[in-house]
Image (spheres, rainbow, N blue to C red):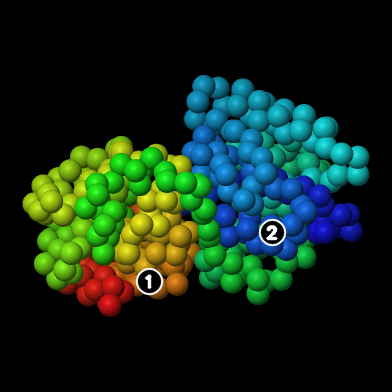
Amino acid sequence: MPALNGRPVTDLVWLQTSFIGDMILNTAAMELARHEWPAVRQSVITTPAGVTIYHDQPFIDRTFLFAKRKGSVWAALQSTAGAVRAWRDRLPAGSHAVILQAHKSFRSSLVSRMTGLPVVTYRETARIPFFGKREVTLVDRVMPFHETARIGMLLEPLGVTREKIVAARPRLVAPGGQSSITRSLSPESRATGTRIAIAPGSVWGTKRWLPERFARLGVELLARVPGARIVLTGSPDEAPLCEAIERKIGDRARVENLAGKTALKDLPALFSTFDLVITNDSSPAHYAAAVNVPTVEIFGATIPAFGFGPLASRHRVVEAGRLDCRPCSDHGPQVCPQGHFRCMKDIAVEQVLEAGLNLLS
C-alpha cells in the first residue's frame, strides 16, 4: 500500500480537467498505480469528455464530473467538491484519500482546496494562493521528460520509482464487443489489409499542416500501398476540413470520412483498426499511442521537446529544419506571428510519405 508522509493511502483521486490528449496521457500513471497497488481505489475528477474517456477503463473505479464550461463556474466548483466530500465521508473507517492534481490551473487548484483532501501537485502550482495551510506535497515538473512521465511524477512521493514512471505508456481499453463505430464501417473497409488514418486537424491553427498537402499525401499513399484505404478522422468542427481533403483525394471508393461521426467512447476501438496514423501534434497521436498503432506525427509551431511526441513503439516525427522563430509558443498560436508559416510550409509531402511508408514496411 502506498504511503504519504508516513500515512497509508487507500484512495487516489486524480484531478485531470485539461485537454483530451492530456487525459489520455494520464492513463499511463493511472495504470501504473493500479499495477503497483491493485487494492488501492482510483477515482478521477474530470470534465464531461474525461468522464467518457475514463468510463469502463479497468484502472478507474469512479469519476466525478467537473462541468467547468457549463453555467456558473462557482456552482460547478461547489458541486464537484461537495460530491467528493460526500464520497470521502462514506469511505470505510481507516481510509485515507489523496488528490493527485495533474492539471495546474487556477480552477483545478481551487477545487482541490475545496475537497478538503491532502494534495500532491507540482511546485509551480503552489504559487496559486488557494492552498493556504493545507497538507500539500510538491513535486518538480521535470521539463525534459515526456508529459506522461511528468504526470507520473505525482506518484513518486507515494513510493513509485522514477524508472517505472518514465517507462509507463498510455493505454485505453476498447469496450467489450463490437462498438457502434466498427459496426458502421463498410464491409470493404473491415476487410482491407491496410487502413491508414489521416487526422489533419488541431484546435491550434499553427499546429495544422496544409490541407492540400494532406490531400496529396492521401493520393500518394493510395498509389503506393496496394489495397490501402484512407480514413479521415476529426471532431465535428473539423468535418469541413476533412470533407475538403476527401474531395481533393478523389478516390471515394478508397477514402472514408469519419470526421464528426465518431463518439469519444468509440475512438479506442476505431484506432485499434488502423495500421498507421498520420497526425499533427494533437490528440490522435495520443490515441494511437494508447492502442500502440504506428504513428507519424507532424510538428509545426511546437516541438517534441515540449513533451507531447508520439509514444507508439514504432513512430516517426516529421518537422521543418531549424527556424529561429520555432517554437513560438507552448500550444502554437492560431496564425503565424511572422506571417510566413515556414514551420509547416517547409515540410514536403515526400517527407511525410517516406516516414509513413517506412513504418508500413
Residue 259, quarter of the rendered image: top left
Q: Residues within 10 Å of mark 1 (few under 14, many from 20)?
A: many
Image location of residue 113, percent across then percent down: 73, 38
Give yes or no for contact between labels 1 and 2 (Cβ–Cβ under 8 Å): no
Residue that appears at 40% across and 57% down = 272
- Give, as a three-letter code, the residue at label 2: Ala
Q: Which is more N-terminal, label 2 or label 1?
A: 2
As measured in the structure, the alpha-carbon distance from the residue carrying label 1 to the one carrying label 2 is: 26 Å
Q: Residue at x 37, y 51 (%)?
A: 270
Front position in the image: 107 or 354 = 354
Considering depth in this image, is 128 or 251 the residue closer to the camera?
A: 251
Kindly state the secondary structure of the residue where label 2 is placed: helix
User: For the residue labelled by badge 1, is the local secondary structure a helix, a strand or a loop?
Assistant: strand
In the rendered image of this protein, does residue 153 appear above or below residue 12? below
Q: Name the residue carrying label 2.
A: 33
In the rendered structure, find residue 315 and report the number of the disc placed on it. Answer: 1
Q: From the viewer's perspective, is residue 114 above or below residue 105?
A: above
**Quadrant in the rendering for residue 318:** bottom left
Could one spot residue 16 in this view of the protein?
A: yes
Q: Is residue 300 above or below residue 23?
A: below
Most foreground residue, 14 or 101: 14
Residue found 44% across the figure and 64% down from its top: 292
26 relative to 339 in the view: left or right: right
x and y, in percent, of residue 1 in the image: 82, 59
Residue 217: numbered disc? none
